[in-house]
Image: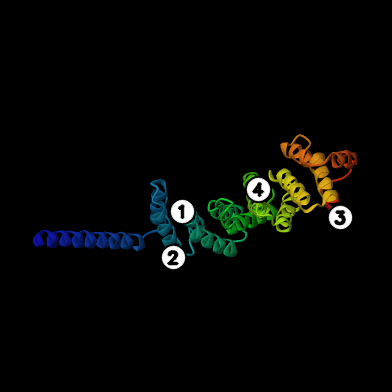
């Protein structure tokens, strides 16, 4: 039995040594001095084979060994792309930030901004978690749209930007509902107000208005509840959230609600202002 354990340990050590040796040989091959075209082509081949970490290392070698070649700048961008494809989002974002700083006039600078946004966008988690990645994705998408509104990446960026806004609104809704179910009405109102004022174009706006009606009703602020219901009915007349709000109003409030909705020039911002 003791001999078997010794043999097993020896085999494990041998495999470990072989693995270390193989890794060392691979690293030495990557860092070996070669013509720039050779390294770049090897990096491209590694990309095609799905070996993204090796591709990133090889693109880095292009820049390290031949920093003044015409291949070097493109290798920096491709290296960042390789890191992104391999799921090394933080490393990719850092590499892209450096590329943007060093090459602000590069022909593919808009793509660098777009890819940097994707590094954060692909890390967005559900609304119950911290939304720092969502905020950073939005910031980078906004920068791209501001600097390069005609970029070929603008259309997809706008779509993803809308999704990040919806996600951020969803976070406020999640917290607001939590407060509402625990009778912390003032705290809930603050969250729903953020959605209504800052995320009007998202899918969460109708529910946020309805939740405001609920919260105001619980607090006995009937005039405010009626006014917000009017906002909901004016902007989303066919919404089931408006139907729910209408049901919880008293007959007197419903009659007043119809008067409120008759003012067709009232927008969300105008109707939410205190009387």
Residue 64's disc number: 2
Residue on which disc 1 sits? 87
Cα separation, mark 3 vs mark 4, equals 27 Å
Nearer the N terminus, badge 3 or badge 4? 4
* Image position of 68 (left or right of 41): right
Cα separation, mark 2 vs mark 3, equals 63 Å
Point out the frontmost of discs 3 and 4.
3
Residue on which disc 4 sits? 166
Residue on which disc 3 sits? 274
Point out the frontmost of discs 3 and 1.
3
Nearer the N terminus, badge 2 or badge 3? 2
Cα separation, mark 3 vs mark 1, equals 49 Å
Tag count in the figure?
Answer: 4
Point out the frontmost of discs 2 and 3.
3
Q: Are marks 3 and 1 in contact (CB under 8 Å)?
A: no
Element at label 2: helix
């Amino acid at each position: 039995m003791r001999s078997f354990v010794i043999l097993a340990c020896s085999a494990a050590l041998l495999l470990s040594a072989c693995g270390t040796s193989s890794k060392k040989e691979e690293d030495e091959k990557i860092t070996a001095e070669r013509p720039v075209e050779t390294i770049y082509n090897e990096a491209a081949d590694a990309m095609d084979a799905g070996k993204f970490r090796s591709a990133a290392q090889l693109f880095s070698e292009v820049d390290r060994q031949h920093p003044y070649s015409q291949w070097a700048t493109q290798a920096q961008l491709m290296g960042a792309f390789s890191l992104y494809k391999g799921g090394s989002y933080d490393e990719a974002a850092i590499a892209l930030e450096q590329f943007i700083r060093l090459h602000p006039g590069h022909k593919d600078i808009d793509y660098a901004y777009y890819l940097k946004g994707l590094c954060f966008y692909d890390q967005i988690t559900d609304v119950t978690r911290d939304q720092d990645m969502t905020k950073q994705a939005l910031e980078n998408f906004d920068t791209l749209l501001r600097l390069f509104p005609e970029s070929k990446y603008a259309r997809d960026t706008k779509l993803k930007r809308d999704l990040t806004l919806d996600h951020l609104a969803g976070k406020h809704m999640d917290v607001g509902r939590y407060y509402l179910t625990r009778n912390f009405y003032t705290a809930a109102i603050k969250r729903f107000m953020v959605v209504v004022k800052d995320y009007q174009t998202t899918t969460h706006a109708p529910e946020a208005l309805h939740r405001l009606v609920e919260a105001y009703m619980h607090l006995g602020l009937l005039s405010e509840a009626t006014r917000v219901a009017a906002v909901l009915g004016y902007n989303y007349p066919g919404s089931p959230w408006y139907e729910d709000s209408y049901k919880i109003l008293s007959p007197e409030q419903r009659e007043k609600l119809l008067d409120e909705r008759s003012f067709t020039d009232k927008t969300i911002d105008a109707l939410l202002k205190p009387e």
